[in-house]
């Protein structure tokens, strides 16, 4: 989709924004969003929508809850701590198969930013070189794309000469810097640049983007509990939330440095730097550009096929049913 078409759609969303809606709902409606990770430009669209008053225009009082290494968005959602969460589709579909009735209602990210970043000195030049090496992998639901990729390659993940040794990687790049792993999990917008900032030059690295390997799965989408979608008022609230959020994303794409500064304003930890967030916003923009928030069913089908093709230990064991709906984005775009 061209930028002109996207801008037109977002403008249409804006025309529907809600002083009238807010009044018809008897005031402001509360919405709590649980993020997948800490406050950073990965979630700029939501913070921009909050700061620029887009949620307020829709009659919404939005609370954004940062994530972290000890926070599982699905658990927060199922426990009633949030109305909607940001999650990656592999972890959401795995959770659904395990009994958590989560449903994708919108998909702001249309491309994957996940990579495996390797030290060139390890001798790894292609995926065929992985066996016999140690690879750092995030867990807590983030391991699913990796496991699917290894299954596609036919590479065991339990070590051995013909397999790879999996190191349970913390949410940092230390295993690579300390030579504990030959490759680590990174995102194009975050950890890769932490490696660079640590003094390792790009030419000393070999990167494998999941997107380029044909095993990319959908990342940051919006998910709710299935039973809540039976309530027309909840659907309307989510439609207004998605509409305002996509306005926020469009503004962030067009004003990347300003969007990064807005994110910094909401970072209560003070851990983020302006340079890192501005750079992150530029990389995140590549993953969101062209999105209307509507889930592409072909991309969904590719994600499902990737997760099913896991050999003897697939991420999911059967084709999901009811795992996404267009009812919210349809309402947002009316």
Image: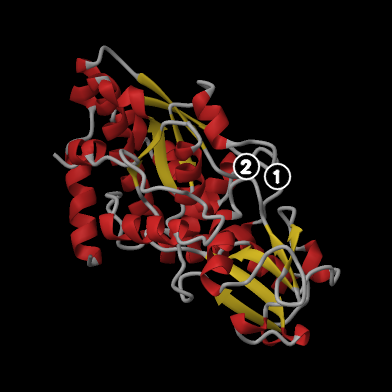
Q: Position of residue 252 (x, y in %)?
A: 41, 54
Location of residue 208 with respect to 61 vertically, above or below: below
Q: Residues within 10 Å of mark 1 (few under 14, many from 20)?
A: few
Q: Residue at the spot x=18%, y=61% of the render?
A: 5
Q: Residue at the spot x=22%, y=34% of the render?
A: 17
- Taking depth in this image into account, of 267 and 292 the one nearest to the observer is 292
Using residue 14 as the reference point, say whether residue 149 is left or right of it.
right
Using residue 157 as the reference point, say whether residue 74 is left or right of it.
left
Q: Position of residue 170 (x, y in %)?
A: 74, 53
Badge 2 marks a residue whose secondary structure is loop
Asked if marks 2 and 1 touch (Cβ < 8 Å), the reply is: yes
Mark 2–mark 1 distance (CA, rounded to whole Å)? 6 Å
Determine which residue is flagged by label 2. Answer: 267
Location of residue 114 with respect to 266 vertically, above or below: below
- Quadrant including the N terminus: bottom left
Location of residue 219 with respect to 68 vertically, above or below: below
Location of residue 247 with respect to 280 vertically, above or below: above
Determine which residue is flagged by label 1. Answer: 270
């Amino acid at each position: 989709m061209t930028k002109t078409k996207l801008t037109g759609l977002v403008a249409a969303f804006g025309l529907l924004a809600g002083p009238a809606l807010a009044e018809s709902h008897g005031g402001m409606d509360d919405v709590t969003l649980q993020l997948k990770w800490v406050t950073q430009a990965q979630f700029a669209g939501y913070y921009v929508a909050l700061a620029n008053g887009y949620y307020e225009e829709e009659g919404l009082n939005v609370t954004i809850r940062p994530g972290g290494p000890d926070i599982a968005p699905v658990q927060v959602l199922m426990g009633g701590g949030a109305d909607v969460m940001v999650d990656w589709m592999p972890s959401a579909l795995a959770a659904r198969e395990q009994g958590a009735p989560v449903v994708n209602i919108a998909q702001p990210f249309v491309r994957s930013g996940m990579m495996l970043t390797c030290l060139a000195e390890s001798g790894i030049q292609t995926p065929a070189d992985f066996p016999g090496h140690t690879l750092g992998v995030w867990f807590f639901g983030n391991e699913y794309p990796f496991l699917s990729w290894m299954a596609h390659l036919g590479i065991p993940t339990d070590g051995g000469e013909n397999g790879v040794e999996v190191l349970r990687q913390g949410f940092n790049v230390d295993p690579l810097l300390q030579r504990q792993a030959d490759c680590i999990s990174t995102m194009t917008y975050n950890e890769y640049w932490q490696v660079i900032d640590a003094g390792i030059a790009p030419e000393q690295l070999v990167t494998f983007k999941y997107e380029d390997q044909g095993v990319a799965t959908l990342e940051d989408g919006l998910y709710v509990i299935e039973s809540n979608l039976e309530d027309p008022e909840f659907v309307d609230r989510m439609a207004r939330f998605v509409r305002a959020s996509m306005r926020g994303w469009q503004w962030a794409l067009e004003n990347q440095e300003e969007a990064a500064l807005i994110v910094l304003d909401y970072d209560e930890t003070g851990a983020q730097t302006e340079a890192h967030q501005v750079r992150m916003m530029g990389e995140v923009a590549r993953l969101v550009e062209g999105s209307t928030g509507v889930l592409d069913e072909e991309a969904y089908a590719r994600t499902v096929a990737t997760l099913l093709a896991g050999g003897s230990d697939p991420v999911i064991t059967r084709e999901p049913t009811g795992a996404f709906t267009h009812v919210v984005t349809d309402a947002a775009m009316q």
